Amino acid sequence: MSIRIGIMGYGNLGRGVECAVRHNPDMELVAVFTRRDPKTVNILTEGAKILPADQAPAMKDEIDVMILCGGSATDLPVQTPALAEYFNVVDSFDTHARIPEHYKNVDEAAKKSGHIGIISVGWDPGMFSLNRMYAGAILTNGKDYTFWGKGVSQGHSDAIRRIKGVKDGKQYTIPVQEALDAVRRGENPELSTRQKHTRECFVVPEEGADLARIEQEIKTMPNYFDEYDTTVHFITEEELKRDHSGIPHGGFVIRSGKTGWNDENSHVIEYSLKLDSNPEFTSSVIVCYARAAFRMQKEGQTGCRTVFDVAPACLSALSGEELRKHML
Amino acid sequence: MSIRIGIMGYGNLGRGVECAVRHNPDMELVAVFTRRDPKTVNILTEGAKILPADQAPAMKDEIDVMILCGGSATDLPVQTPALAEYFNVVDSFDTHARIPEHYKNVDEAAKKSGHIGIISVGWDPGMFSLNRMYAGAILTNGKDYTFWGKGVSQGHSDAIRRIKGVKDGKQYTIPVQEALDAVRRGENPELSTRQKHTRECFVVPEEGADLARIEQEIKTMPNYFDEYDTTVHFITEEELKRDHSGIPHGGFVIRSGKTGWNDENSHVIEYSLKLDSNPEFTSSVIVCYARAAFRMQKEGQTGCRTVFDVAPACLSALSGEELRKHML
């Protein structure tokens, strides 16, 4: 029996989930839900339905896990608890400051309806969080570092595009190699924001725009760029399309710490990702947690979970016996 | 209330566990058990007892988790199930082929007595297994690579020391940089044993020994060296002591895989360890799983577990709320 999946929202992430379901033979995509006119949405999976978002509750007996692919700012805080009334749900909520509140809302809804909701799934939050946690538990006397990139930051790209005279743009976050190297050597450096990452922008200006003013506005933009060393390149629309249409990302979680009776020995734990497609990788993680949500509810569990609460074996299509035999 | 720890066997690993307990304020070392004459054993922890191994059962009400620090060949297959009758137990059993059998024996004993037994804990098996499993679940269409080193292999060092004319010796396992680089580039290479690792030996010969014969015997030793490119250095006893008395190790678990509707995007997940002390790092992992064993039994669970079955949050001294707030 397949795990029957629904997708709420069909942007980059929704399409990524669709691809990930195809890579997991124990799952089947039943329907994609959208707030757009379903007639205007083309999906890839033969046989799956495209339905208006508000028809989701009517599909409650045909879908085991609903995967929420909306944004963290306004969609997920409302949708995840609301849909937990009808389905097991998984989302990639990533507004760190609001996680405790979101957890509480999903927990209440999921307990009431007898479902499992797993929130903040992906790679950060998600696999990076897990690695921070495992490494922190093992090396109690140590220090954590997270570096992001090289990759596209959607938030920073959006910020560039809001500047007057900018037609289009893309921003890459890049870890500083010297900082990475120092951390890997176990030196436990104190690093400022500027010492950890640089920012590189590729900007398509409107015709006749004041390039010097645009560059200045970018480099001094509070919160987004002012604390970083930023490089700005002006390019044509064709160059942007040709060289910068991908959504790569990645990063590094490193913890170095000491063991021994007098802390005489050093250790470095490093986890890194190099991703051609940020949304497709995020989706691949989410789909594993959809399997876990399905299994945990079948066992009689209910309520909200995060990656910290899910036993690793729950994610795998392999049985416990197979895992012990081939993976341990 | 502290988690009360017992250590069975006081070699490098037992001493490492003692140091790790010191780094975890929610734990306390109650006793070390040894098959040697307790009067000849010196431990570091003030107030902890040193007792004969056969007196362990009598301490069943004073110890929450017994950590087994014996060898996988003959100690653990007997000790872990036997002590699961009296305690929650954690071991680092690493004979891969015998894991299913060991799991079954510990499971039966632990279920009967109402305890939790967690087996095969450390870094490989252990953290490396976890990373193979997580990465394999996420990138279903991909390929796994494990590299070990640079580090000391006790088994290979022992093999050298059994050769006639060898007084002492140490063997390092070293990953081949070109192989690592090809894997990291996502090339999914097919790699022979020889292409993945080299072996470097530091040998102290007895006076007048035939060095050419020793070198030849090492390089052609079946199973241990014959499938590798091996370098042999002859050094003095003083040099061995000065330059090679540590027990460093480490390695890399890398999975590269494809996502997208037509597998058009590549991803690389890498986990690596660089360890000054193999036994102290292994011990630091074991101690986290001792915390988990204690908690899982308190929740009413019984039986055998591996790292695959333990929810990450169980390992951490932080509460679920703290983890969500600071680590997610």
Image (cartoon, coloured by chain):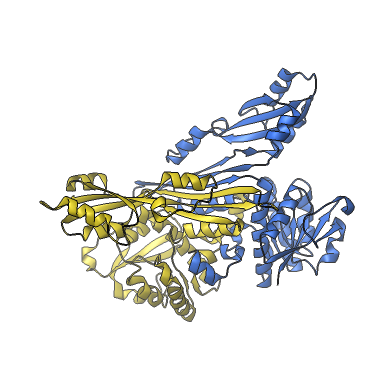
Chain colours: A blue, B yellow
Looking at the picture, how far across and down is residue A216, in whole percent?
69, 21
**Along the viewing direction, whichever of B98 and B219 lies nearer the viewer:** B219
**Along the viewing direction, whichever of A3 and A67 lies nearer the viewer:** A3
Query: How many marks are shown on the rendered structure?
Result: 0
Residue A56 falls in image quadrant:
bottom right
Up-down: is B293 above or below B203?
Answer: below
Looking at the picture, how far across and down is residue B106, in whole percent?
44, 75
**Along the viewing direction, whichever of B161 and A64 lies nearer the viewer:** B161
Q: Is residue A323 left or right of residue B138?
A: left
Residue A18 falls in image quadrant:
bottom right
Up-down: is A275 above or below A85?
Answer: above
**Along the viewing direction, whichever of A195 and B219 lies nearer the viewer:** B219
Q: Is residue A112 left or right of residue A324?
A: right
Residue A81 seen in this snapshot: yes
Looking at the picture, how far across and down is residue B267, in whole percent?
59, 48
Up-down: is A103 above or below A258?
Answer: below
Q: Is residue B7 left or right of residue A316?
A: left
The residue shown at (86%, 65%) is A58
The residue shown at (73%, 22%) is A214
Question: Residue lying furthest bottom in this view?
Answer: B112
